[in-house]
Amino acid sequence: MEEEKKFVGGWGKGNKMGERRPEDICWKERWVDVGSAVRLLDLSAMSQMQRSFSIDLPSLRLPSRRETHLWYILPDEVKSTSLLKRYSQLLSQTEKDRVDQMRGDELKKNALLARTLVRTTIARYQTNEAVDPRSLMFKKNMYGKPELDWQNCNVQPLHFNISHTDSLIACGVTVHVPVGIDVEDKERKIKHDVLTFAKRFYSADEVNCLATILDPEAQRKEFIKLWTLKEAYVKALGKGFSAAPFNTFTIQSNPGGYNLCKTSEITANPLEETKKCNGGWKFALLELADSHYAAVCTEDDQADEGAPMRVIVRKTIPFVEDQLILKEYFCN
Amino acid sequence: MASLSATSLSFKAPSIQSTRISQVLRKPSSFQSISFGGFQSSKSLRLQISCAAKPETVQKVSDIVKEQLALSADTALTAESKFSALGADSLDTVEIVMALEEKFNISVEESDAQNITTIQEAADLIEDLVQKKPAA
């Protein structure tokens, strides 16, 4: 039976309880650095966790190269109608219209939280002066991927990507390279048989890998992990699903981490299909809130090829609090 | 999905009859090709020459969507209902497509699968593929 690891491929472990970053003078945090084998937080540690409160949006240090900042909101923790009203005031008219289009209060709320998370998070990374989240403008690349229109609003060029489920909304932020993220509920049930689904959509190597997992539950979990990793890659690539159909690339699971292998058919003979596994992309797979898998994919800068990706995860309720969850390195 | 919605052109009446008319009116919008799924010029061409899907097809698609998204039986779905507005993510969309393939005994290209955003689009695609199948 496969032992469930909390974080895959991490190194740079070590307990760093109570460390404060020098630049966070007003922003008091305590956090626990979690190694890959250690369970995240027992209840007593949780009660000692000092949360940070702020009236406005405290500014943030930009992600460094090779760093992805991953932010998430748990909709169940946001109940205050006055807070939700405050959030809705941040949205553009187009965004408000899209929220209204959602069918049902829960979906409307989550759509609102998603846009709020994007606007408030990006606004906090602006180093020159405080930026009003309402003033941020967004555009789409030629394939439809949402991007920050940074030139038109005089802000730092950042890359971001959102993903959400019913119970968690996440946003990844990077500086130098495009990022893609995907989150899925760990317990998500697939209506079809997992292998049938995989044979239809995944690559042959991935199907073979899944087929070796005999326990149906473990197989389902692996399927979901692969889904998030593949989605994260396609979203990082930013060219739409047609540019990278799921069966044309393999996410390879190694002891150290995950790798991308692109299948290219050089000749008409399928036996000569070759795989390029030096990727050009970095992956991280983590668990959030004990309930979700989250995959992060960033493009490899040529200078950084082979270097690990650092991920900093924070849970947030905009205008209320942040909670630093982890800082971890993910190898390829 | 960034596809241009032509609801400003179509009638808002809920009946399928007016939907069919609005589908015809919607023909000039080849802007549908500029969506997150990449250029779909062949797809919009297909919409131009085929008629809108039969009401029964739309109904069958609605039933499958309701089941996949676990919507209550009395959720009102129209042909224009967008999957994303109903809370479907990409995994749901793919599962819906697989269910449609099984139900209608067709095979959907992955690029088409990922680009279905409404019940109408799913129904149109199905009828198109059913039509193209060689006679049994």
Image (cartoon, rainbow, N blue to C red):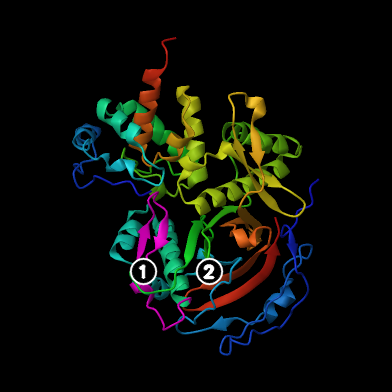
Residue at 77 percent across and 75 percent down: it is A15
Farthest residue in the top direction? B136
Q: Earlier in the sequence, mark 2 or mark 1?
A: 2
Q: Is disc 1 surrounded by few (<14), some (14 to 19) or many (20+) residues within 10 Å?
A: few
Q: Which residue is mark 2?
A: A77
Task: State which region is magenta.
Answer: A125-149
Label 2 sits on what residue type?
Glu
Q: Which residue is at the front of the view, A235 or A150?
A: A150
Q: Is residue A16 magenta?
A: no
Q: Which residue is mark 1?
A: A151
Asked whether residue A129 is drawn in magenta, I would say yes
Asked if A246 appears above or below B106 in the picture, the reply is: below
SS state under label 2? helix
Q: CA distance from mark 2 to mark 1?
A: 35 Å
Task: Pinpoint residue B67: horizontal percent, then vertical percent.
Answer: 48, 38
State which quadrant residue A305 falls in.
Answer: bottom right
Residue B77 position, x and y percent, is 34, 41
SS of the residue under disc 1: loop
User: Which of the pair A190/A252 is nearer the observer?
Assistant: A252
On screen, residue A268 versus residue B60, left or right, reads right
Q: Position of residue A66 (x, y in %)?
A: 61, 65
